[in-house]
Amino acid sequence: MTSEPPLLVALDLAGTFVFGLNGALTAVRTARLDIVGVLALAVITALGGGITRDVLIGAIPPAAFGDWRYLALALGGGVVAFGLSRWLDRLEISIVVLDAVGLSVFAVIGTVKALEFGLGVGPAILLGAISAVGGGTIRDVLIRRIPSVLHSDLYAIPALIAAALTAAAVRTGTYGLPAALGAAAVCFAVRMVGVRFHLNAPGPPGGGGPHRDRGHHQDEGRDDHR
Amino acid sequence: MTSEPPLLVALDLAGTFVFGLNGALTAVRTARLDIVGVLALAVITALGGGITRDVLIGAIPPAAFGDWRYLALALGGGVVAFGLSRWLDRLEISIVVLDAVGLSVFAVIGTVKALEFGLGVGPAILLGAISAVGGGTIRDVLIRRIPSVLHSDLYAIPALIAAALTAAAVRTGTYGLPAALGAAAVCFAVRMVGVRFHLNAPGPPGGGGPHRDRGHHQDEGRDDHR
Amino acid sequence: MTSEPPLLVALDLAGTFVFGLNGALTAVRTARLDIVGVLALAVITALGGGITRDVLIGAIPPAAFGDWRYLALALGGGVVAFGLSRWLDRLEISIVVLDAVGLSVFAVIGTVKALEFGLGVGPAILLGAISAVGGGTIRDVLIRRIPSVLHSDLYAIPALIAAALTAAAVRTGTYGLPAALGAAAVCFAVRMVGVRFHLNAPGPPGGGGPHRDRGHHQDEGRDDHR
């Protein structure tokens, strides 16, 4: 993503690091894996969404393999989370907050990259969202949780909003650092509101509504508050 | 797939729509997801097989991202299933029947596309089957079911038969609309016979046979008859 | 992989066969699938890692689809395991040993192929490990087990060691048949020591350590000793 301004590259790398932290903390807390499993889950969470996007748009090899900083930061996030997991618990640095940061940054950058590779606005928005939620989805499948994107308080929606705002900015020629940060901030804010108030999109009409996420929210709550 | 006759393109689009319906109904009935989860599962079920095929044969970006109608129909199937899920229940439009329609169409079209991209007959048949079963397999993994393709009454076999018939027709120069519809019809019929009589391929010799699919069939039965 | 010496090609094919055996035995013993499920799991276990590697490095179509011997040997391993599963049990040919053979061979060959496609040393090592563990990981996800790579006695570590040794040999110009066999032998030995003594990488500091793999090891133990 050489066409990105330095701050966006920095944010992309920061998102990689926090997704690495996130994946590793999830591995430590939820699945109680050893260090290899923790680092594997850190790398998968941090790089899985972007690699999926790059495969789908034909950016081969994926940026995660062409630029050593991504792999280093994903592993770095994993090592930090592994070593400091008890301390991070005490600081109450939440998996969910870290996840929202990565979600926001990756949605914006993924959309821009998909547009650069010539995809239409609709697919680019979808690919931005895939960049954002892909790594966490693979993480959840591997440790046998229903992926957050399918059930969790406004998870895919903020990513789609940020991707749509980004695509609109690119198409109207107003894309730049302020637009990117604004779109990411909207995503982060919507996600945090969803988490705070346990908002969900509506369930099917007349049905019992979506399961109130009992089992899964207990999981997430546990992650969040430990 | 510009080389396909219009009716086949129409069938491909119809298959996308019914797989979208299928994924969404599965989401509503089995996993009780909210609308975002329902639409996500609709899109994944409808487009997952074709996207996997396109990535493996190098058709990048995948047709599902290059032609807006696929994404629109997948979402449309999801919206219809979400809105009308109670009514669809009453009509007893079965997930399993919809699934068989998509299975049949995608097996034929996936095989043709793989051959067009230069793959041999064996891999093209496999890719036809992957097109057909891929979306449902990803759907099942995401909602934590053992994928139908691994255990269910004649699921992969009809897809492979249709793919083989299609490949034979292409190689003998007799491929056209009648051959495509014929291969799809054979797949649909074999699958429906398998569902009706709960047929399974044989289990390992001397063993207890394959598990009689108790747990999973109850699931599917529930889907089927509600 | 035309640049490989014949013995390495033979080993690659042998690895494909034993991974096919492995996937099929896992399907028979753990999940009790019918023959279609058994063969599907054989093919996925044998070819999944290499296909993932080829997609990520841009080797399209993947070798598994371009060379019929891979698919034939994967299916052959599946058929043998299906037909002889009771006899293989009595011989105590272990899933775990077969798995270690495939792991070793695929780690070496995957690394070489990634380097040939121009990737850097770090990504090439990662892709070698992905080649080695990818098929088994997809297998485990499909039958709903936590993947071995995340928790099992030294599984990813020997693959990474073999990949690193291979990359070092290639970069120092000393790669050849002895280096390849040596790297694979180290991987096999480390893995077998890990299995024998139930070694795991360390858990997070101050925590309860990684779960002592009770549930999963019982599974694997059952596979191993039957």
Image (tube, coloured by chain):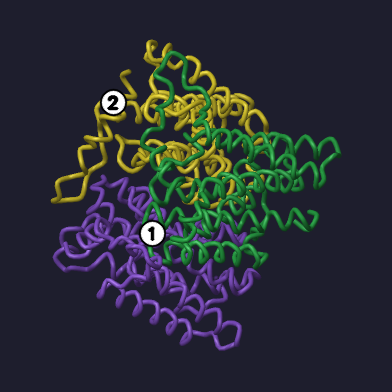
Chain colours: A purple, B green, C yellow
**What's the mark number on residue C129?**
none
The residue sitting at 47% across, 29% down in the picture is C102
Three-letter residue code for mark 1? Gly
Q: Which residue is mark 1?
A: A136
The residue sitting at 84% across, 35% down in the picture is B172
Where on the picture, by quarter, is residue A226? bottom left
- Label 2 crowd bin: few (<14), some (14–19), many (20+), radius 10 Å: few
Check the residue under mark 1 and report the chain it is in: A
Q: Position of residue C122 (x, y in %)?
A: 47, 51
Q: Which residue is mark 2?
A: C221
Where on the picture, by quarter, is residue B108? top right
Say which element carries label 1: helix
* Residue situated furthest right in the rendering: B173
For the residue pair C45 and A191, the one nearer the viewer reads as A191
The reply to whether dot 1 and dot 2 touch (C-beta < 8 Å) is no
Say which element carries label 2: helix
Q: Is residue A87 left or right of residue A142?
A: left
Q: Up-down: is C133 above or below B102?
A: above
Q: Position of residue A70 (x, y in %)?
A: 44, 62
Q: Position of residue B68 (x, y in %)?
A: 65, 68
The residue sitting at 37% across, 71% down in the picture is A201
Check the residue under mark 2 and report the chain it is in: C
Three-letter residue code for mark 2? Gly
Q: How far is disc 1 from disc 2 in space, using C-alphas?
A: 30 Å
Does label 2 lie on the same chain as label 1? no
Kindly tell me whether residue C186 is visible in this rendering: no
Where on the picture, by quarter, is residue B208? top left
For the residue pair C219 and A72, the one nearer the viewer reads as C219
